[in-house]
Amino acid sequence: MKWDEYAKWGKHIAGWGADYHSSLADRPVRAQTAIGEIAAQIPMTPPESGEEMATILKDFDEVIMPGMTHWQHPRFFAYFPANATPPSMLAEQLVNTVAAQCMLWQTSPAATELEGVMVNWLRQALGLAVGFTGVIQDSASSATLSAVLTMRERATGFTGNKDGLSQKGHLRIYCSTEVHTSIDRACWVAGIGQANLVKIATKGPLFGMDADALDAAIRADIAAGHIPAGIIAITGGTGIGACDDLRAVLRVAQAHDLYTHLDAAWAGSAMICPEFRDTFWAGVDSFDSIVFNPHKWLGAQFDCSVQFLRDATPQLNTLKIEPEYLKTSGEEVVNYSEWTIPLGRRFRALKIWFLLRSYGLDDLRRRIRNHVAWAEALCARIRAMEGFEICSDPILSLFTFRAPGDDAAQQRLVDAINDDGRIYVTQGSHAGRKVIRFQVGQFDTTEDDVMMAETVIAEVWEQIK
């Protein structure tokens, strides 16, 4: 393809994108295709000769698009959002066009320096203390793995990377039963093992980790000769939005000199609203590591996860490796590839810059506040539906409910709702029962979109009960 063709098709795709987003409300939210249906339409061998872009784009429309679930749909209420605002998409187009590999300061100084400033802008927006630095990761999973590796190294006197773990004893990580499975996976990958991830029961209206039980588990492990390495807390857990009492967790951590990481991947974005901080953020400044995803609720196109560090030195001592070919001569600079597991790095800071400048914090706060209020209003309506039960009240904009019947009935309702196509929800588990999760967070959703869910749920239930 020549560059004049690139310009032609670039304009075509930009127009297609605007039309796509304008028509999203008229499409079913979830892909309505059967398993294998898309693959069956694609040749099993690669082409020997090039094809025209017009043909390729026609196949994209006719073959690929029917199999896409529309994450930017205003009635996407499943999982957590992966919002992509127009300014962040434009920034990504520029990043894709420049196509820089931003692993070191010298491989693109602007990318490194903008990243430092954007992390600081977000630190201020979330009300974190002066002194926190940080790095943009691809996802919260990578940030959590970085933190777990740091816990491992700190607990072994920073000898695990060099010596391996075979003679280091049983390193133990502690968290609540409400954590995301990325914590489990981080312990697998770090060599700590599932058996050494100690999950503590929860209590209270926010389903937070029982701090007394946490302290008792740590003391029991010490008595058994195990080595406590760190604690992972949550603000806004994936299942029901569970939130730990951060100050209570920190008191235990400080009593045992343990490294702490806070997973606020979803709910962290809501902390740009000061009124939520007393409930969900109190004590946060004492955590060693904190992660939140601007690509969830804040509107930065996936992928974009920010890890804040109270002191970057332990993570650098864990992950930094500097062969001669990666050294930067001259003055000392920040190379963010030394803060993360991947060496290669995309220019993720640009979409944060575009996003924050385009909307400002006031507009972003307004949207989050609306989502919280609309979730509470919808929850009240579902509570009033005959036979329906609210299983967990709204924590920010996430709540769970059940229809009349057993667990199988809940899954039948979820599947029927998603086959209907007007809204998209997912199932979950709470207190040993299957529940239906509902979260409000799509960037451009409206109050009417959210309230439509009551009608859809009632109509679909009436059809299948």
Image (cartoon, rainbow, N blue to C red):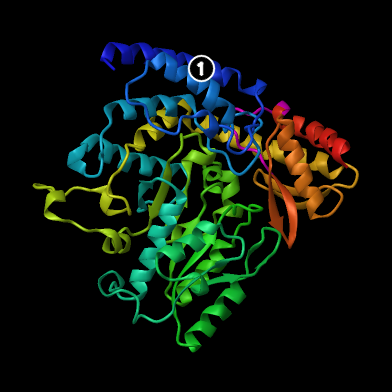
Overall secondary structure of the magenta section:
loop
Q: Is residue 280 magenta?
A: no
Judged left or right of residue 5, residue 143 is right
Instruction: State how many labels appear.
Output: 1
Considering depth in this image, is 387 or 412 the residue closer to the camera? 412
Considering depth in this image, is 395 or 23 the residue closer to the camera? 23
Residue 106 image point, x, y percent: 17, 40
Neighbor class of circle 1 (other Cα within 10 Å; few <14, some 14-19, many 20+) is few
Is residue 80 visible to us here?
yes
Q: Residue at x 43, y 40 (%)?
A: 303
Farthest residue toward the left?
A: 330
Residue 114 image point, x, y percent: 30, 37
Residue segment shown in magenta: 438-448
Q: Is residue 442 magenta?
A: yes
Q: Residue at x 66, y 20 (%)?
A: 26
| Quarter of the figure with the N terminus | top left
| Quarter of the figure with the C terminus | top right
Is residue 260 visible to us here?
no
Residue 65 image point, x, y percent: 55, 26
> Circle 1 is placed at which residue position?
18
- Under tag 1, what secondary structure? helix
Residue 181 sits in which quadrant? bottom right
Residue 378 sits in which quadrant? top right
Q: Is residue 245 above or below residue 266?
A: below
Residue 360 image point, x, y percent: 47, 30
Q: Amino acid at mark 1?
A: Ala
Q: Residue at x 47, y 24 (%)?
A: 86
Residue 304 sits in which quadrant? top left
